[in-house]
Amino acid sequence: MKRAFLIKYGEIALKGKNRRIFEDVLVKRIRQALDSVDGTYKIERPRGRIFIEPETGMDELETIEALKCVFGIVAICPVIMVEDEGFEALAEHVVDFFGESFNDRSLTFKVDSRRSRKNYPLNSMELNADLGERLLMAYPQLKVDVHNPKVLVRVEVRDNISIYVREIPGPGGMPIGTNGSAQLLLSGGIDSPVAGYMIAKRGVTVHATYFHAPPYTSERARQKVEDLARILSRYLGSVTLHVVNFTDIQMTIYEKCPHDELTIIMRRYMMKIAEHFAKCDGDLGLVTGESIGQVASQTMQSLACTDAATSMPVYRPLIGFDKQEIVDVSERIGTYDTSILPYEDCCTIFVAKHPVTRPRIERILKSEENLYGVIEDLVTKAIEETDTVEIS
Ligand code: ATP
Ligand code: MG
C-alpha cells in the first residue's frame, strides 16, 4: 500500500496549451511549497492528475499545511493506493482507511467507484453496493445517503486502485506566475496585505513598495512590514520589497500644500514612486488595499485623484469589501495579529483634522505646482536611496 495526496485543481475552463501551462506552473509551486517540509517526495502526473507521494519522513499535517498555501489547489485528498488483490482485500483497505480517517463515525456516506479497467470482475454499481455494505457492517453508526452524503468514499480502479474519503480545501485561485506581475503598495495596516493576497490568488506575482518616514516612523514599523511580507511569502513565494524613505517628500508637501489635501497629494507621490519600481520589476499594474468610502482618502473622488497620478492600471482587490470582511480574510491568512501592532504609519503622522472628501483633480494639480522645482530632486533621491530586500 502506498500513501499519497491527490491534488484537485480548478479553472476547468482552461483548455489546450493554457491548461498545460497552468499545470506545469502548479507543479513548480507545489515543489517550492514542499521545500519547507522535511523529507522527500515524488510527484506523478498520470492523465491530467497530480499525485504527491511522500517517500521518507514527511509529516502528513505539515505537508497538508504547506499545500494549503498553494494557489491553484482546490482540494487536497489523502489517498491510499493498493494493488488489486481481489475484492476481500479491497474491502478491508476501504474499511481500515475509513476508520483511520474519521474518529466520529455518526456520518452519512456513499461509495462512488469508477472503473477505468473494464476487466475488473465487479462493475462500478456492484462495487458501490458491496463496499457500502462492508462499511455498514464495520461501522454500524454509519448511514447511507446517496443524494447528499457527508462523506464520499471514492474508489478508482486502474492498474492499481486508489481510495480517498477526505477532501481538504485548498486556497483555490490560480498558480502564481500564470497571470503577470504587479506592484503592491504595502503598508503595515490590515488592508494592503489582504489586497496582496487577493491579487496573488489570481496567479499574479507580487512585488511590493513600502514608504516610511524615519525618524517619525520607527525601525519597528519597518520591521512590522517586513514581517507582513514574510507571512505573505508563505503564499506568494519570495517577495521583493522596496523600502522608500519618504520623509523629505512628506515634509515638503506638508510645508507647501493645503493641509486638507495632504493625504491625497502624499498618496499621489506614493503612486508615482511605486510606478517607477513597477516598471523596473516588469509589472503590469499597481495594487492598493483601498475600498470605497472607508476613509476620506478613499471616496470615489479621492480614488480618481489618486489614479490620475499614474498611467498604470491600479488594482484594488478590496474595493467592495466591508472592513469586517477584510479582517476575516486577514485572520484566516495569518496577517491580522501583526497588522494590529501599534506602530505608526507615515500616513498617520501628518494628517489633517478635516481632510477633503471630494477633492477635484484641478485643485490638487494647482496645489502641487507649489512643489515644482523641489520635489523632482527629492523623488529622484528617494528612488536612488531605496533599500530593496528579498523576503522569503
Ligand atoms: P492599510 O491597512 O493597507 O494601511 P488603510 O485602510 O490604512 O490601508 P490608507 O492608510 O488610507 O488605508 O492607505 C490606503 C492604501 O495606500 C493602503 O492600502 C496601501 O496600499 C497604500 N499605503 C498607505 N500607506 C502606505 C505606506 N506607508 N507604504 C506603502 N503603501 C501605503
Ligand atoms: Mg494605512
Image (cartoon, rainbow, N blue to C red):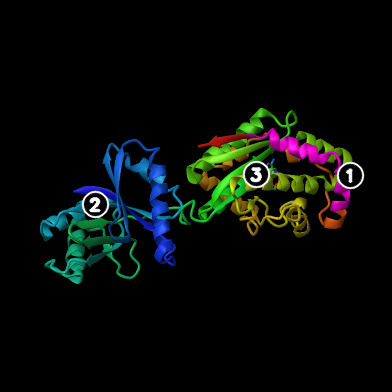
Q: Position of residue 68 (x, y in %)?
A: 42, 48
Q: Nearer the viewer, residue 61 or 195?
A: 195
Instruction: Specify whether residue 1 is in view.
Output: yes
Q: Amino acid at mark 2?
A: Ile
Q: Is mark 1 within 8 Å of ligand 1?
A: no
The reply, left or right, for residue 98 in relation to residue 277 is left
State the mark number for residue 385.
Answer: none
Give the answer, above or below, for where 130 lies relative to 285. below
Tell me what residue is drawn at x 63 percent, y 35 percent: 341
Q: Amino acid at mark 3?
A: Phe
**Viewer-side label of 2, 1:** 1
Question: Which of the marked residues, 2 or 1, is nearer the chain's N terminus?
Answer: 2
The image quadrant that residue 269 belongs to is: top right
Q: Secondary structure at mark 1?
A: helix
Q: How many residues crowd around disc 3 within 10 Å: few (fewer than 14), some, or many (20 or more)?
A: some
Marks 3 and 2, how far apart at CA = 48 Å
Residue range of the region highlighted in magenta in the rendering: 365-387
Instruction: Specify whether residue 350 is in view.
Output: no
Question: Which of the marked residues, 3 or 2, is nearer the chain's N terminus?
Answer: 2
Q: Is residue 370 magenta?
A: yes
Name the residue carrying label 3.
Answer: 277
Q: How many residues crowd around disc 2 within 10 Å: few (fewer than 14), some, or many (20 or more)?
A: many
Q: Secondary structure at mark 2?
A: strand
Q: How many residues crowd around disc 1 within 10 Å: few (fewer than 14), some, or many (20 or more)?
A: some
Q: Position of residue 250 (x, y in %)?
A: 79, 38
Q: Is mark 3 within 8 Å of ligand 1?
A: no
Question: Which of the marked residues, 3 or 1, is nearer the chain's N terminus?
Answer: 3
Tell me what residue is drawn at x 20 percent, y 69 percent: 124
Give the answer, above or below, for where 68 lies relative to 381. below
Name the residue carrying label 1.
Answer: 370
Q: Amino acid at mark 1?
A: Asn
Name the residue carrying label 2.
Answer: 80
